[in-house]
Image: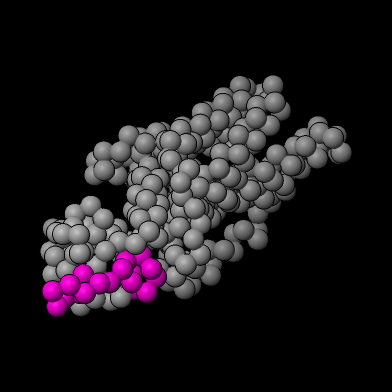
Amino acid sequence: MEFLLENILNLVGFLVGLAIGIMAYIGFRNTGSPTLFRLTIAFFSISLGFFVIWSGYMIEDFVIKSGAIERGIQTVGIVIQTVGYFFIAFSHSIKSFFPKSNYFRSVGILPFFLVSTVQLEHIFRSISFILLVYGAIETILSYRDNKNKGAISVAIGLALLAFGEFLGWYSFVFPESMLYSISMAIKIGGLIALFIPVSKIPLKRIKFDDDLDKI
Amino acid sequence: MGEYRTQMKIIGDILSTTQDDLQDENGATVTYLIRKANISHSRISTILKTLVSQGLLERGDSQGSNRYKISQSGREFLQAYKSFTKFADNFGLNI
């Protein structure tokens, strides 16, 4: 059950991330907007992250057959996804997350060399959680200004991904419980909520025009 | 306090004016665009020059003054701009 849900989640994540990423890329090509460029990187990263984890499960299932996914692959996938969540949050001007002093910047990266991949996975899951919560709050706040109902759906999607990420992390405390399966079901719901408003954008008559790149 | 507008939003406003809100069929004057797009003369001059060089606007001459009309490329750009503004709005962002 957990394996099936994990596969569905990663495939849905890969496809949704890819679809939104392609849409953002078309927008960037047509308008040259830096915001759309950041969203392109964000969703291609999220898509790639899900794909890496899905590949890990497939390799484990058909080649290695050890009964558990290679921890390193899972961690790499989560790190790539975190990069994507960072760019979503960054688009909302997330500047206060960085320490100002060069000393703290250099020391900040040190812990990553001192911990195992399991601990790294926990660290990146918590960073993802913070970034997703930040993105959800900023998106719902934007609804006050533009009254765009799609923003509610995206905010719910980001919030569900955050909650799923939290439950996924918390399930390490109760490894035999249903928490991890529930977390995956919630994340699938979050990805679908993200995709609903984006799927309604009409793109049929938009075409690439190289002359518009320079504007 | 006025709402902050990105360069893209200003371009969108100028193109929208030249498409939907023209004074007459000869095109819009710079003064009219300044008033409609709410932008300074020096800034709009640079933007208009860029838009004309990119083929999004066409410059004509009528009654001794420059007039600007949207081109076919400009219409396509404006359509893309409107679609992707909605796309970015869904994420609570401005393009």
Query: Toward which corner of the image does residue B44 lie, by quadrant?
Result: bottom left
Residue at x 72%, y 47% (from the top left corner)? A73
Q: How is the image coloured?
A: one colour
B41 lies left or right of A76: left
Residue A68 lies in magenta, yes or no?
Answer: no
Identify whether A125 is placed above or below A209: above
Q: Nearer the viewer, residue B62 or B38?
A: B62
Q: Say which of A70 and A89 sits in front.
A: A89
Q: Residue A153 placed where, x, y %?
A: 39, 33
The magenta segment: B50-67
Q: Is residue A146 visible?
A: yes
Tell me the quarter of the picture where residue B56 sits: bottom left
The location of residue B9, given as percent across then percent down, is 29, 58
Q: Quadrant of the C terminus of chain A?
A: bottom left
Q: In this image, B41 relative to B12: left or right?
A: left
Residue depicted at 61% across the width and 21% down the height? A178
The image quadrant that residue A152 belongs to is top left
Q: How many marks?
A: 0
Give above or below for A8 relative to B22.
above
Query: Taking A166 as reference, is B46 left or right?
Result: left
Q: Position of residue B74 (x, y in %)?
A: 36, 60
Q: Position of residue A84 (x, y in %)?
A: 53, 51
Q: Is residue B51 magenta?
A: yes
Location of the N terminus of chain A (image quadrant): top right
A107 relative position to B70: left or right = right
Residue A91 makes an appearance in the image: no
Q: Residue at x 36, y 45 (%)?
A: B86
Residue at image coords 16%, 76%: B65
**Relative depth, front residue between A146 and A203:** A203
Q: Is residue B52 above or below residue B24?
A: below
